[in-house]
Amino acid sequence: MPATPAWPPASTPRLFIDSALGEGMAVPVDGAAANYLGNVMRLKEGDPVRLFDDRTGEWLAEVSSVSKRSLTLAITAQLSVREDVPDLWLVAAPIKKGRIDWVAEKACELGVARLVPVITRRTIVDRLNVERLRTHMIEAAEQCGRTALPEITEPVKLGALLRDWPADRTLYFADEAGGLPFVDVAKPGPAAILVGPEGGFTDEERVAIRAVPGATGTSLGPRILRAETAAAAAIAIWMAAAGDWRSESR
Ligand code: SAH
């Protein structure tokens, strides 16, 4: 047993702050976060909180004042620098609320660097609340000890996405009609996984996607998966085969 207990305790609340943090800073907290810390967690003056900002890393802070609707946290020490995240984008067609929220949460946990919602011919969701997806990613990052958040972009149409595709980024197209086993072709380096909506891709879309230089049609096995399962499975395969789940990448 270590003579001194680990500090801060593992149960210390973690909070994402959307601005750069630094030594000695006073951080005002209001709204839902203040309600959570003050009323749900019942923090008092002097209690520890862990903060991260997706920029500098993670910091230890303590509550310096509490009022009814806000609190102030005083940063006392840096706990870690921002983690490195593999350069993987998830390009996914919006699917129904609840399922797309799940995709955002899991993409964050699994270590995706950017989530790009893509509008395809068979996309049935007409309005996507990007802020709601970002909230799900923030909650996952807070719970899972993460110091980095995926970026999320505004939805983009498939045609425009393919037209402007960056030449240095491999586009792994999860094709329910079949392709090379993803586990065999996933390679390290800038990458993106493209997953379709509930109704899949049209034949014309398949042709257009495969025409992009560097695009690789890949299979996630002999069974058709729901879009959200395909997204999570594909990320896991890439992380294991080409990302930072390998021992040599640690
Ligand atoms: N309704 C469609 C299936 C769509 S599945 C049909 O019956 O054909 C939704 C998306 O998940 C697909 O567009 C694809 O990107 C991905 N996907 C599902 N199963 C897959 C598999 N076995 N291999 C590769 N991609 C798959």
Image (tube, grey):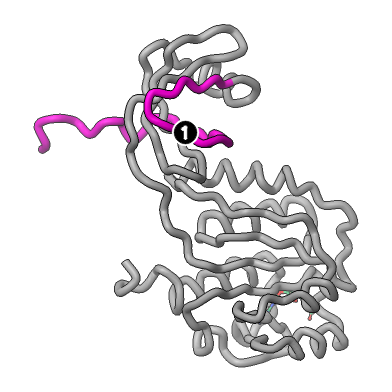
Give the amino acid at mark 1. Leu
Figure quadrant of residue 100: bottom right
**11 falls in the magenta region:** yes
146 in relation to 93, above or below: above
Task: Say which of 236 and 186 sits in front.
Answer: 186
Task: Measuring from the top left, give residue 78's x and y in whole percent.
Answer: 34, 35
Image quarter where ligand 1 lies:
bottom right
**Residue 111 vs residue 209: left or right?**
left
* Highlighted range, magenta: 1-29
Q: Which residue is mark 1?
A: 21
Q: What is the chief secondary structure element of the magenta stretch?
A: loop
Figure quadrant of residue 158: bottom right
Task: Measuring from the top left, give residue 170's x and y in whole percent.
Answer: 61, 81
* Figure label count: 1
**50 falls in the magenta region:** no
159 in relation to 101, above or below: below
Task: Say which of 119 and 25 sits in front.
Answer: 25
**Residue 8 vs residue 214: left or right?**
left
